[in-house]
Amino acid sequence: MGFINDAKAQVAGDHARKAYANGDYILVYKFIEANTNSKATAPMTGMADQIQAVEQAGWVLQHMAAAEGKALTGERVALVCMFRRRNQ
């Protein structure tokens, strides 16, 4: 994992821990990753690391929607994920 992916995972985990501590039971989070070749099948390790950071904070991924698009700097993939608090 690179510096940028590490930072993104840390931020996602921080937001997830804060929402959990606030007593929220649903967390909706948008993840964005650069996609240099949208036609290739490949792991999305940056996304996986961020989702794992949220799940480690006590959440479980329930639903996900994906979209691809172009921004000024190139192609991007966005995942909008809905998490629920893990049953305790």
Image (cartoon, rainbow, N blue to C red):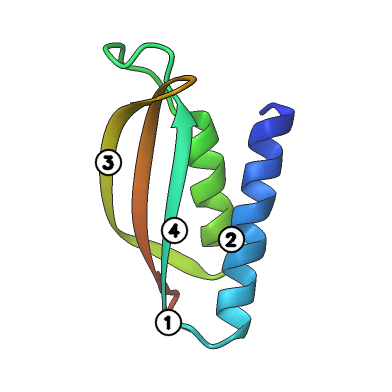
Identify the secondary structure beneath mark 3. strand
Q: CA distance from mark 1 to mark 4?
A: 13 Å
Label 4: how many Cα within 10 Å (few below 14, some 14–19, many 20+)? some
Disc with the residue nearer the chain's start (2 vs 4): 4
Q: Nearer the viewer, residue 41 or 66?
A: 66
Give above or below for 65 relative to 26.
Answer: above
- Label 2, on which residue? 56
Residue 66 — which label? 3
Identify the secondary structure beneath mark 4. strand
Disc with the residue nearer the chain's start (4 vs 3): 4
Label 1: how many Cα within 10 Å (few below 14, some 14–19, many 20+)? few
Kind of residue at badge 2 = Gln
Kind of residue at badge 1 = Tyr
Kind of residue at badge 3 = Ala
Q: CA distance from mark 1 to mark 2?
A: 15 Å
Disc with the residue nearer the chain's start (2 vs 3): 2
- Label 4, on which residue? 29
Confirm or deny contact between disc 2 and disc 4 (CB under 8 A). no
The label nearer to you, 1 versus 4, is: 4
On screen, residue 50 versus residue 77, left or right, reads right
- Label 1, on which residue? 25
Q: CA distance from mark 2 to mark 4?
A: 15 Å
Give above or below for 2 relative to 23.
Answer: above
